Amino acid sequence: MPKTEANSAPFSYDGLDRVIHEKARLGLLTSLMAHPKGLAFADLKQLCGLTDGNLSRHLQVLQEAGLVEVTKGYEGNRPHTTCRLTKSGRRRFLDYLAVLERLVRDAAKAAGKEDAAIARLGILPV
């Protein structure tokens, strides 16, 4: 098989977007994916176990990347912030998940080959 840009580094996983891949942002996007109408700031904070400042900063990064929309307003006399995935944010997150699924399949396949080799040699895994 000739080397091409697509297959010369099959384990580089270029689709693992660094903006998404950070642990807190991954949790935020997953929470928002599960709630397509959006979530209140306080609910998102609780679901992801973040502080106000941490959540604000991660939302800012996601908003600047076009993944999340933040709407500020009032509910009664109280400030209310709602966060939701943008259409392109949803698409990018689904693309990211597809790459992540490929990574997991590749790792499981490699682990299966290792397990088979160990079994052939009669070595017990540690």
Image (spheres, grey):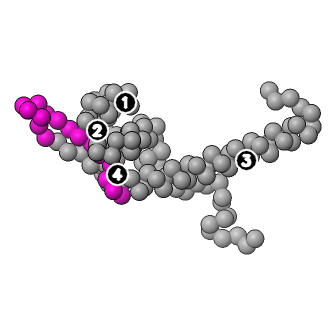
Can residue 60 be seen in the rendering of this structure? no
Q: Would you name the residue on which mark 4 appears? A: 67
Q: CA distance from mark 4 to mark 2?
A: 14 Å
Give the magenta range: 73-88
Q: Would you name the residue on which mark 1 appears? A: 47
The quarter of the displayed image where residue 8 is located: bottom right
SS class, disc 4: loop
In primary-sequence order, the first of circles 1 and 2 is 2
Q: Are marks 4 and 1 in contact (CB under 8 Å)?
A: no
Q: Would you name the residue on which mark 3 appears? A: 109
What residue type is disc 1 on?
A: Leu
What residue type is disc 3 on?
A: Lys
SS class, disc 1: helix
What residue type is disc 2 on?
A: Leu
Q: Are marks 1 and 3 in contact (CB under 8 Å)?
A: no
In primary-sequence order, the first of circles 4 and 1 is 1
Which percent across, then down, holds residue 80? 17, 35
Residue farthest to the bottom, as pictured: 2
In primary-sequence order, the first of circles 1 and 3 is 1
Instruction: Name the residue at 74% across, 46% down.
Output: 110
Q: Are marks 2 and 3 in contact (CB under 8 Å)?
A: no
In primary-sequence order, the first of circles 4 and 3 is 4
